[in-house]
Image: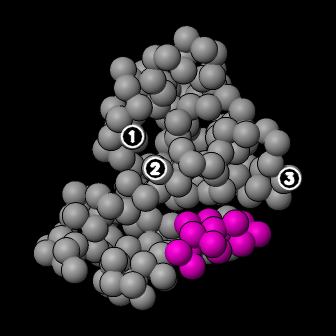
């Protein structure tokens, strides 16, 4: 396992979510800061994005926001981020986040979060990256997606080994230990991408 200096998070930009999701996001940011790990995220100024950034910044940590220009123009960015990279497109945003991250963590979120998580796993399946991927399953939020993935395997849309591309934890305190103990993913496993 290589050293971990920066971790990307994917999560909701909604302020209308349950408080336990907000608390977990803020706590995760705090834990990153205490471990001297930079938090990378989509630079959103509200919701779980802002909560995670606030947790990191309030604990003295560094936060890298990556956001497309049209979102900056709409005022959706977080001016508190330590550094911001402005991209032209959403595709460039996702690629930039991945390029700067040593690991990825998915917190509760909507279709954008799911899309980012599933693309990240697709890239890992194809050997385009080998970073640890952790799902922070606060209050069982991801239970239905995990059941769907198990069903994909049952229906032979995926191989059982692909269930090993990610680790599921329940609390923010479990995230960093899961990343540090994650087995190294073999990029040659791409040969198994086709069933």
**Residue range of the region highlighted in magenta in the rendering:** 135-148
| Of residues 38 and 96, the one drawn nearer to the viewer in this rendering | 96
- Left or right position of 94 against 22: left
Q: Residues within 10 Å of mark 2 (few under 14, many from 20)?
A: some
Q: Is residue 97 visible?
A: yes
User: What residue does disc 1 label?
Assistant: 94
Q: Please identify the residue farthest to the top as the structure is shown.
A: 73
Is residue 145 on the magenta stretch? yes
**Percent x, y of residue 162:** 34, 78
Residue 192, quarter of picture: bottom left
Q: Is residue 103 above or below residue 12?
A: below
Q: How many marks?
A: 3
User: What residue does disc 2 label?
Assistant: 116
Q: Residues within 10 Å of mark 1 (few under 14, many from 20)?
A: some
Question: Contact, CB < 8 Å: mark 3 with mark 1?
Answer: no
Q: Earlier in the sequence, mark 2 or mark 1?
A: 1
Q: Is residue 4 visible?
A: no
Which residue is rendered at x = 73% and y = 40% of the image? Answer: 14
User: What residue does disc 3 label?
Assistant: 19
Q: Please identify the residue farthest to the front as the structure is shown.
A: 155
**Percent x, y of residue 195:** 22, 80
Q: How is the image coloured?
A: one colour
**Percent x, y of residue 194:** 19, 74
């Amino acid at each position: 396992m290589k050293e971990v200096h920066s971790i990307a998070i994917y999560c909701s930009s909604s302020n209308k979510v349950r408080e336990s999701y907000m608390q977990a996001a803020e706590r995760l940011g705090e834990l990153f800061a205490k471990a001297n790990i930079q938090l990378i995220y989509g630079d959103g100024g509200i919701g779980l994005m802002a909560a995670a950034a606030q947790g990191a910044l309030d604990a003295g940590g560094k936060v890298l926001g990556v956001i497309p220009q049209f979102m900056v123009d709409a005022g959706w960015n977080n001016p508190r981020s330590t550094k911001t990279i402005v991209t032209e497109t959403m595709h460039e945003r996702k690629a930039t986040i991945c390029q700067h991250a040593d690991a990825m963590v998915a917190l509760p979120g909507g279709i954008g979060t799911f899309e980012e998580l599933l693309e990240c796993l697709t890239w890992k399946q194809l050997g385009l990256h080998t970073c640890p991927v952790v799902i922070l399953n606060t209050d069982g939020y991801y239970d239905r997606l995990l059941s769907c993935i198990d069903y994909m395997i049952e229906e032979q849309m995926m191989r059982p080994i692909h269930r090993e591309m990610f680790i599921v934890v329940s609390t923010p305190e479990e995230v960093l230990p899961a990343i540090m103990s994650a087995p190294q993913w073999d990029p040659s496993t791409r040969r198994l991408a086709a069933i």
